[in-house]
Image (tube, grey):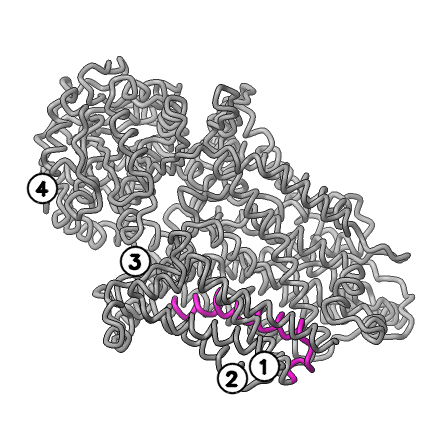
């Protein structure tokens, strides 16, 4: 009985495959009846083997007792999948990419468009069938749901993470004449505008790589120092404004890019409030000092300090107080205790915080583009190579490879650093000691660093809140107005129904759609991945885990460029669609959901799942009925994070937006570039309100885990923006 | 569980109408004039026809690059506005469609000349002269009146102009200097001017906005952009350089193979009508319209009062000249230390 039922489930894939090749348009934009069969008969004969494989598989599934263990089943699935990819990549839009295919199929010279519904579904069906075949042969201990999940996620990762990166790397070696060679890459990578040290010797300007590194190191060092001051104040003193500090640390996460940059210009630009005031004070001429390194540094420290704060706070709170107490009991002065006990224990967290900020600084795009002036960094240079007038994908790819190398190196150092030495202080033994207050000197130093930060942040956000609703904040014309909001979001009821005239509607609607679609998808894939890693044993698990993390390490600009390189030509021709935006977010944010899921699963004993399994539930059922209800907080984290990122991320999407599907951040960037600060700020305020409302709604929807326990606060990492 | 799905369903339903009222017909517009004008023009067209306009504003150089990059499968329908040179280049490279609008007879001779030069693949929609504007609170004594005055040390790090790679405005300036002084002298001038430039912006009109807010003292732009800032209350004085200056014929082209060809032609004919061309002035764009019966806004700089050079659109709009000038600019100006 059970075997027959399982066989039927397996039939679904075969049926789907048949439908995909017989009934659905095979190509992108094809007519409804232009299925693989019809196209094959009409001349694209290379599609016929696929139709044949689909029919043979259906026949086998109906006739044999179990097609999954039949050798012919495995052969058909493997051959079908292989041929699908070979013909797709082998025959491009304007003819065969592989000369052999041209000889074999003369009609291939006319080329073929990208995959349509039929081709996509055929791929999914073949992957599903492959999972069945493997599971029947003992993969994942025969657990069919897990096998499908693993094969599915691995295929998706290969297609949407690895393939674009490989494509990008090869684009770096393509010369201006379109041929593949080493010389163009070497010429580009050794160019003096990348490595020049001119600014240090005073003989010109520095290369972009040097600029990026200088900015990254300075910004990470300052942000870590400030984060440490914040963490010490919150964890180890009786400082009054702890709640305020925690609240401020959340702000950067929901702040759309560019807004802080614009607010800094309003304050410190040449005609900024502060600049003018200070210049008058000292009787000097106001300058453009903020444009370039000082401005970017200021904005980045402001944005990254909360991140380092959360990392360091977690570390400080995890230090077992008995160690410090022992030191004090033995007669050490507070300063000595801090220097010899607390500080050494904090070192790994400091390194982690520094590297995190360094990586974020390298990947940051929004601040350099607003405040950079003529201070070029890698991320902006990549952007201009692609969207500027000299569309030069080779140059962009080369710079992306450089940026990726730097980022991966930093990640590697981070894991190496954290791997060394023992910093374990939380053990099973009692940790009922009292935390040592920080020495007075350090406390006052921390206060001196934190108070300006708080004032500054409050000032920046005051500008942001006001700027959208006064006439022209850049010129200090403070007459209140809703004009900017109306420019962005005007609408009208007339004989055509409701008509939206505001120029921001298009981007706002797309952004909402993309966020609403990508958040649940990201959550689902992330939690599923977490469950696979934490609960399933399968071959290649380490590689699988590494692969999911890789998408986390790739800077957004690099992802954007790699998607352009990979997906603007058939077979996977999805640039300019909404799908590419959703896919981009799902795979960039996947590791966040995964990490949260793994952490949550680690706290839950396997016995409950095993009990469920013993009672006869399959893998999918256990996941749905037992695991998911227990890890609600992780689900919530993943949902909120991916939703918010989809609304605020800019570095990857800026390459992927189109006139048809524009995103809020890309629209805001255009306004900032054009000096329409007020409009940009007004729109950003609306975005922030929408985010807060949506997060609140999600909180109501998903809610907290209903256990009689305290909820734990877990810091979540950010992907390199 | 069921309740949650019901909630998700409700949310999806709430989002539905947003997607549903997209008109059956739409038009993808690449717009290269000022954002405000782009908005006003799209809105007027939407009101008139009910066709939903999906508009992106990008500099003309960028739009040209985008249309070229999308050549295999064009995603835009109409490229409206922006200096004529990149339009001519696109026409020469076959990126745009030939179309003789019935409205051609209503146009100024300089607008039809643009169409004839390109084999009717583009047409003039407005004209405007190049110049610069200065912030009168920052430049109080002895204000600049000529191109040569901009080399004054007083303006060190105080002048902005766009990057000619991305901006048609800046390319017009480059071509104007070459025609005014000769190529080598023009590059020598630009190299000297480089010392006074604080930033090469991406968008052509951004420099005057920076001058209006005082972030910079002088912006080299089309004069109508400078006038627009004065009209909105900024202390900007517009200057027509004494040595003479070049001008643009802002153009419009149909993108070859665009997704909505019918809507595109509707836009094209409509955009050449007098009524449609008078919208610019309401959006603070004071170019001279190409339709003879459209009224020229009183604020518009009078072309007759400006010493205009005999701008060679055919030569400086051609791919070869453009590519040669831009690569020389990259090598000799863009690479200079800052």
Q: Is residue A157 magenta?
A: yes
The chain to which mark 3 is attached is A
- Residue A396 position, x and y percent, is 35, 60
Magenta span? A138-167
Q: Which residue is mark 1?
A: A64
Q: CA distance from mark 4 to mark 1?
A: 74 Å
Dot 2 alpha-carbon crowd within 10 angstroms: few under 14, some 14 to 19, many 20 or more: some
Residue A643 numbered mark, or none: none
Q: Which residue is mark 3?
A: A392
- Residue A409 position, x and y percent, is 51, 72
Q: Which residue is mark 4?
A: B315
Q: Label 2, secondary structure: give it.
A: helix
For the residues bearing labels 3 and 2, Cβ distance under 8 angstroms: no
Which residue in the rendered view is the most extreme toward the front? Answer: A63
The chain to which mark 4 is attached is B
Residue A72 numbered mark, or none: 2
Dot 3 alpha-carbon crowd within 10 angstroms: few under 14, some 14 to 19, many 20 or more: some
Which residue is painted at 41% across and 29% down in the image? B213
> Which label sits in the foreground, 1 or 2?
1
A468 or B158, which lies in front? Answer: A468
Which residue is painted at 62% across and 81% down in the image? A66
3 or 2: tag closer to the N-terminus: 2
For the residues bearing labels 4 and 1, Cβ distance under 8 angstroms: no
The chain to which mark 2 is attached is A
């Amino acid at each position: 009985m059970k075997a027959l039922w399982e066989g039927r489930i397996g039939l679904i894939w075969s049926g789907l495959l048949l439908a995909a090749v017989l009934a659905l348009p095979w190509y992108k934009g094809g007519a409804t009846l232009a299925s693989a069969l019809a196209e094959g008969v009409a001349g694209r004969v290379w599609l016929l083997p696929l139709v044949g494989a689909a029919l043979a598989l259906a026949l086998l599934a109906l006739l044999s007792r179990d097609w999954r263990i039949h050798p012919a089943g495995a052969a058909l699935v493997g051959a079908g999948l292989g041929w699908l990819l070979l013909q797709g990549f082998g025959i491009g839009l304007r003819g065969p990419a592989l000369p052999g295919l041209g000889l074999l199929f003369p009609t291939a010279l006319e080329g073929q468009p990208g995959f349509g519904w039929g081709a996509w579904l055929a791929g999914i069906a073949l992957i599903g069938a492959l999972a069945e075949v493997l599971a029947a042969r003992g993969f994942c201990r025969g657990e069919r749901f897990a096998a499908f999940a693993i094969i599915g996620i691995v295929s998706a990762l290969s297609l949407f993470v690895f393939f674009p990166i490989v494509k990008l790397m090869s684009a770096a070696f393509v010369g201006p004449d379109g041929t593949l060679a080493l010389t163009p890459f070497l010429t580009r990578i050794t160019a003096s505008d990348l490595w020049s040290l001119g600014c240090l010797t005073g003989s010109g300007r520095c290369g972009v790589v040097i600029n990026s590194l200088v900015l990254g190191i300075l910004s990470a060092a300052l942000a870590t120092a400030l984060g440490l001051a914040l963490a010490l104040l919150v964890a180890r003193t009786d400082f009054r404004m702890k709640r305020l500090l925690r609240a401020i640390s959340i702000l950067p996460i929901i702040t759309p890019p560019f807004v802080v940059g614009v607010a800094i210009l309003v304050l410190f630009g040449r005609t900024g409030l502060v600049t003018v005031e200070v210049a008058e004070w000292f009787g000097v001429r106001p300058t453009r000092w903020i444009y370039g390194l000082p401005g970017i540094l200021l904005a980045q420290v402001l944005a990254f300090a909360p991140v380092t704060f959360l990392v360091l706070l977690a570390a400080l709170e995890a230090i077992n107080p008995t160690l410090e107490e022992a030191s004090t009991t033995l007669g050490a002065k507070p300063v000595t205790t801090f220097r010899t006990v607390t500080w050494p224990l904090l070192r790994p967290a400091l390194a982690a915080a520094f590297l995190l900020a360094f990586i974020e600084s390298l990947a940051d795009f929004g601040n350099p583009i607003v405040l950079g002036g003529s201070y070029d960094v890698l991320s902006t240079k990549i952007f201009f190579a692609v969207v500027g007038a000299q569309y030069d994908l080779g140059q962009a790819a080369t710079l992306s490879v450089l940026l990726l190398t730097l980022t991966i190196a930093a990640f590697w150092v981070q894991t190496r650093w954290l791997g060394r030495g023992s910093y374990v202080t939380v053990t099973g033994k009692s940790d009922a000691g009292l935390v040592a207050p920080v020495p007075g000197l350090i406390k006052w130093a921390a206060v001196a660093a934190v108070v300006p930060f708080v004032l500054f942040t409050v000032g920046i956000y005051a500008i942001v809140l006001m700027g959208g609703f006064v006439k022209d904040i850049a010129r200090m014309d403070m007459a209140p107005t809703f004009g900017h909001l109306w420019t962005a979001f005007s609408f009208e009821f007339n004989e055509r129904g409701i008509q939206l005239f505001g120029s921001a509607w298009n981007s706002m609607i797309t952004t909402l759609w993309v966020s609403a679609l990508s958040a649940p998808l990201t959550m689902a894939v992330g939690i599923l991945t977490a469950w696979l890693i934490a609960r399933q044993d399968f071959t290649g698990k380490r590689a699988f885990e590494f692969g999911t993390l890789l998408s986390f390490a790739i800077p957004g600009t690099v992802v954007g460029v790699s998607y352009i390189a990979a997906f603007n030509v058939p077979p996977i021709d999805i640039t300019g669609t909404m799908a590419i935006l959703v896919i981009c977010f799902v795979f960039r944010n996947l590791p966040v959901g995964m990490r949260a899921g793994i952490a949550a699963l680690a706290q839950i004993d396997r016995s409950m799942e095993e009990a469920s399994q013993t009672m006869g539930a399959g893998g999918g059922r256990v996941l749905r009925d037992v695991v998911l209800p227990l890890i609600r907080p992780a689900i919530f984290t993943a949902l909120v994070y991916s939703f918010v990122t989809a609304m605020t991320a800019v570095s990857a999407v800026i390459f992927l937006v189109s006139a048809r599907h524009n995103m809020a951040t890309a629209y805001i960037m255009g306004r900032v570039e054009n000096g329409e600060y007020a409009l940009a700020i007004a729109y950003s305020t609306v975005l922030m309100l929408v985010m807060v409302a949506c997060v609140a709604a999600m909180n109501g929807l998903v809610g907290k885990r209903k256990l009689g326990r305290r909820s734990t606060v877990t810091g979540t990492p950010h992907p390199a923006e | 569980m069921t309740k949650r799905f019901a909630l998700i369903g409700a949310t999806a339903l709430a989002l539905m109408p947003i997607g549903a009222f997209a008109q059956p017909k739409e038009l993808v517009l690449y717009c290269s004039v000022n954002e405000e004008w782009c908005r006003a023009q799209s809105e007027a067209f939407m009101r008139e026809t009910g066709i939903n306009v999906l508009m992106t504003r990008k500099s003309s150089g960028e739009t040209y690059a985008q249309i070229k990059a999308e050549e295999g499968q064009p995603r835009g329908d109409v490229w409206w506005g922006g200096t004529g040179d990149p339009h001519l280049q696109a026409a020469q490279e076959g990126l745009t469609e030939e179309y003789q609008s019935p409205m051609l007879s209503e146009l100024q001779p300089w607008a039809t000349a643009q169409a004839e030069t390109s084999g009717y693949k583009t047409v003039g929609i407005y004209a405007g002269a190049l110049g610069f504007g200065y912030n009168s609170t920052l430049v109080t004594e002895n204000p600049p009146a000529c191109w040569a005055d901009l080399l004054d040390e007083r303006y060190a790090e105080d002048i902005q102009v766009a990057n000619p790679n991305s901006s048609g405005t800046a390319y017009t300036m480059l071509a104007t200097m070459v025609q005014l002084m000769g190529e080598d002298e023009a590059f020598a001038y630009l190299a000297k001017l480089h010392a006074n430039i604080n930033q090469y912006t991406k968008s052509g009109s951004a420099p005057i906005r920076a001058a209006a807010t005082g972030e910079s003292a002088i912006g080299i732009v089309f004069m109508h952009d400078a006038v627009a800032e004065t009209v909105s209350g900024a202390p900007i004085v517009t200057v027509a350089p004494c040595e003479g200056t070049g001008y643009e014929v802002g153009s419009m082209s149909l993108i070859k193979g665009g997704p909505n060809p019918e809507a595109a032609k509707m836009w094209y004919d409509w955009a050449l009508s007098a009524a449609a061309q008078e919208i610019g002035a309401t959006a603070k764009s004071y170019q001279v319209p190409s339709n003879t019966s459209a009224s020229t806004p009183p604020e518009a700089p009078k072309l007759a009062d400006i010493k205009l050079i005999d701008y060679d659109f055919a030569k400086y709009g051609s791919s070869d000249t453009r590519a040669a000038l831009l690569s020389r600019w990259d090598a000799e100006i863009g690479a200079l230390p800052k």
